[in-house]
Image (cartoon, helix red, strand yellow):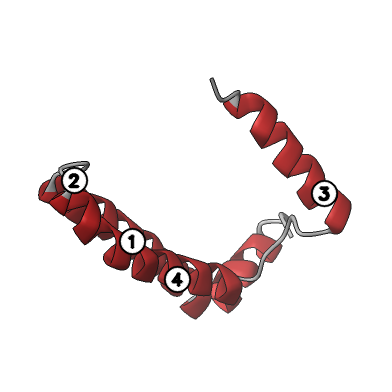
Amino acid sequence: MVDVAEIRTRLEAAAEKTGLKDFSLDGQIEEVAREIHQRLRVYPNSIANRGMREGEAEYRIARLHAVKRTLEWLKANEAEIRAAAKTAGRA
């Protein structure tokens, strides 16, 4: 059985050690776009092999598109968000 907590702890430690904790919004957008592309390639086989229902695949891809749109909105509004945070004394 996979120990998710242990894996998470190891990944967080590796990220901290290598300084990869903070990723740019552009990098996050690129990664989500890559994941969407990957799933569009893989899911049809999963559906054909009855490992996944078509509705589930559509739902998961739609959620990733929502994540991408959120990140794109944050990127487009980054300056205003940072200014508001600074004004509020949080940055």
Please report whichever mark, 2 or 4, sits nearer to the chain's N-terminal start: 4
Q: Residues within 10 Å of mark 2 (few under 14, many from 20)?
A: few
Q: Nearer the viewer, mark 3 or mark 1?
A: 1
**Label 3 neighbourhood size at 10 Å, few (<14), some (14-19), many (20+)?**
few
Give the left or right position of residue 12, taking residue 35 as reference.
right
Q: Secondary structure at mark 3?
A: helix
Q: Residue at x 30, y 67 (%)?
A: 41
Alpha carbon of mark 2 to alpha carbon of mark 4: how far?
19 Å
| Relative depth, front residue between 30 and 47 | 47
Give the CA separation, mark 4 to mark 1: 9 Å
Could you say which disc has been placed on residue 34 in the image?
4
Residue matched to label 2: 56
Q: Which sits earlier in the primary sequence, circle 2 or circle 1?
A: 1
Residue matched to label 3: 16
Secondary structure beneath disc 4? helix
x, y (%) of residue 30?
Answer: 51, 74
Q: CA distance from mark 4 to mark 3?
A: 24 Å
Q: Which residue is mark 1?
A: 39
Spot the residue most to the right. Answer: 17
Name which residue lies at 83% across and 58% down: 19
Residues at marks 3 and 1 touching, judged by CB atoms closer than 8 Å? no
As drawn, is 48 to the left or to the right of 10? left
